[in-house]
Every structure is written in C-alpha cells, then in structure tokens.
Amino acid sequence: MPADSLTARLSTHQSLLLGSLLFGLFFGAGNLIFPISMGLTAGSSVLPATLGFLVAAVGLPILGVVASALAGTVSLHELASRVAPWFGVLFTCALYLTIGPFFAIPRTATVSYEMAFGGTLSDGAGRWALAGFTAVFIAVALAAAIRPGKLLDYVGKWLTPVFLVLLGLLLVVARLGSGSAAPAAQGPYASHALSQGVLDGYNTMDALASLAFAIVVIEAVRRLGVTQPRRIAIEVGRAGVLAAVAMCVIYAALAILGSRSTHVVARDANGAVALSRVASESFGGIGHLLAALIMGVACLKTCIGLLTACAEMFRTMFPGSLSQRGWATVFAVASFAVANVGLDTIIKAAVPVLVLLYPLAIGIIVLGLLDPWVRHRPWAYRLTMLGAGVVSLLFLLATQVGVPAGVASAASAAGGVLPGFELGFGWILPALIGLVAGMALPRR
C-alpha cells in the first residue's frame, strides 16, 4: 500500500479497478430494464430520450460521488447535517431505506427472478419460486456484504468484468443496426422526449445511490493509500470518467436496441421481459439463459454494494446499536420481505418517493460541488433544500393518483406559475433562488 502523503496517487491499474468498482456498484437491475423499456416507447424519439436519460442516470450519479469527495465529508449524514442535524438524520434514513430494503435491494432480487422464471410458472408455484429465489439471492449478497474489505475484489475484479463480457456478447450478436425500424414515439416521448428521458433516468435511483455509495468508494481509495481529501476527489473523478463512459455506451446501446425490437416484444412490456425476448431471438434456446445470467450478475453486484453501504451508514449514524453485520442482516431480511410483493408493485410504489427525494438529492450534490463557497453558509443549504422540497411536494400532490381532486387542483395552481412545473422541474428555480439568497446572508 502506498505511503500516506500529499502526493500519493493511484496507479493506472488501480484507477481502472476503482472505475470498475464504481461502474459495478451503479449498474444493476434498473440500469438494464429502464433503458430498453424507454427505447420501446420512445421509438423514433429514442436519441433525445436517451440524452435526457444519460443526464439523470450517468451525469448526476458521478457528480454525486465527486461532490461527496470534494466536500471532504465522511458520509451523506455529515453532508446533509449542514442543513440541520434533524434533516441530516431524516434525509439520510429516507434515502438509504429507499435505495436499500424498501425499493432498490428488493428490485435487484425480483428483476433477477423475473428474468429467470417470469411467466413460466403458475401463480401458486410462482409465489413459492419467488420466495426461494430471493432468499438464496439475498443470502449470497449478504455473505459478501459482511466482508466490506473485500468489496473491491468481489465487484471490481470479478463480477463487473464477467458482466461486461456477457452483456457485450448480447449487444454485438443482437446487431443494433438490424431489426425493425423504430416506430413513432408514444405518450410523453412524442412531445417532450428529452425531459421525459430525464425523468426515466430518475428510476435507476443512481443519483440517490451515489450519495450512499460515496462512503464505499472513498473508503476504497483510502484503502489504496490515498488519504489527502483533494487527491481523493481527483482519484474519484478519474474513476468516475471511466465508469461514465462505459455507462453511456451501454445505456445508448440498450435504448436503441429497444427502439428497434418492437417486432418481438410489446411496447408496454417491462424491461426484463424485453431483454429476455431480444436475447432469445438472437441466440435461440440459450438466449433466455444468457439474459438471466447477465441480469443475475448485474443485480448481485449492486445488491452487495447496497447492503454494504446501508449497513455501514446505519452503524456509523447510530453508534452503539448494531454491528455492520447486524445491520446488514436486518436489511437483508427486510429486503426479502419486500421483494416478495413482486417487481411491478415495487416499481409503482417507488415513483412518489423518487419524486420527493430526487430534487433534494440533486440539491445536496450541487451544494457538495460548491463546497468551497458554501461550507460556512448554512442558510445556502437550508434555503436550497426548502425551495426544492416544497415544490417537489406540490408536484407530487398535483400528479399522483389517489390525491383528492381539490388538493391536486390547488397544488397544480400553486406550482403552475413556475417554469417547467408540469414536466417535474419546477423545483429548480426556487432552489436556485434559495441558494443565491442563502449566499447573501451572513456567515455563521
């Protein structure tokens, strides 16, 4: 291990390994199913939709990890506590539970199951098969997660390279230039494909996960001998570029593949079904097995990372409670329970939570990037979060099914005066105003 000094830096091999770890942590269940599903619906508007998707699913996550490193914070809890101590606890718990046992971890297990067995079993047998599969899947992830010091090996050295080889094989053989011509765009893609692509990118949860994975990635850099904060940020940024390039190429390939596969799969099919059918068309009988292996490896490495990050965060945030192994076990059991409600239910339930959390997470990322200027200006944090949070709540009330008509109408009227509100971006202007106002207020 290199000596601790101001000049310590990672070798090219170590940077590649860190980039592989970063890519492996991010690229899981949603990263495979959402781009191809988006391509099916976006059709001829797939390029602007993909561009928007890349902003939310690549740009924001990489910036999130870099922001945490630049801010010199050990964890999201420390960074979010600059708003207020109570906010730090509340927001950190909400984010980690979302990308942990409530949504993202169960999704890794259910997507893997859907790819392997979806539609092949009766309802009764399917429920038992889902329970057995998710129990084994999460148990394997738990066995790796309770050894956080081995994460760089498990994900960076082994699982990510295997995943890239398998997925590359599928994409090459599927021949992106073949298949049917992309049909006309459907739904919101017909009128505003770019902004809809951004909203679809939210579904990967990677901007949220970046704030959680930051503690894992930064610790990996420290284990490699780099401890100076500025140098850590530089090394994380280098690894981020490598991960971003790989993610952009794969997302674009999957989206284009989806747009040209409407002859083999219904346009409203979920991404797991779409990927399986495309693989079966390209490889015949073994295509389904290949797709299942790709999805299984992708989901397993992300599940390991999420369990590790969640357990480590709750151990440090609540000292004297449970050990890292204890928290990992609790989250694994909770994830198993949630996973058995099914993939479609998990995806639908996640939407309103993401509508609320994403603007706040983006605000935290921007503030982390501006850390040299806002570190000692708590009102910049507070007013930015206030502006983003209030408008996000209004948008949720105005758009979600089940909200009383009077409440939805009032929320729509209140938020409708803001630019981009109807597209889900009305929070940006209030957040910017809050940031500027907070910068103008006296330092603490």
Image (spheres, rainbow, N blue to C red):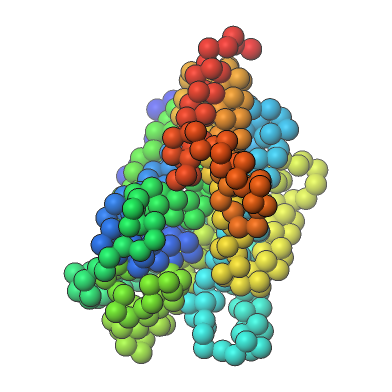
Comparing 82 with 144, the one in front is 82
Q: Quadrant of residue 89?
A: top right
Residue 243 appears in the picture as rendered: no
- The percent coordinates of residue 62 (x first, y second) are 42, 43
Comparing 194 with 423, the one in front is 423
Q: In the rendered image of this protein, does residue 356 appear above or below residue 265? A: above
- The percent coordinates of residue 24 (x first, y second) are 44, 57
- The percent coordinates of residue 4 (x first, y second) are 49, 31
User: At 31% across and 83% down in the image, what residue appears?
Assistant: 281
Report the side of 141 relative to 237 (left or right).
right
Query: Which residue appears farthest toward the right when viewing the image?
Result: 320
User: At 60% across and 41% down in the image, what residue appears?
Assistant: 411
Report the side of 340 relative to 188 (left or right).
right
- Give the mark count: 0
User: At 49% across and 64% down in the image, what residue appears?
Assistant: 29
Report the side of 288 relative to 443 (left or right).
left
Comparing 147 with 26, the one in front is 26
Residue 101 appears in the picture as rendered: yes
Q: In the rendered image of this protein, does residue 128 appear above or below residue 309? A: below
User: At 65% across and 57% down in the image, what residue appears?
Assistant: 402
Comparing 299 with 179, the one in front is 179
- The percent coordinates of residue 263 (x first, y second) are 29, 79
Q: In the rendered image of this protein, does residue 416 appear above or below residue 196? A: above
Q: Quadrant of the C terminus?
A: top right
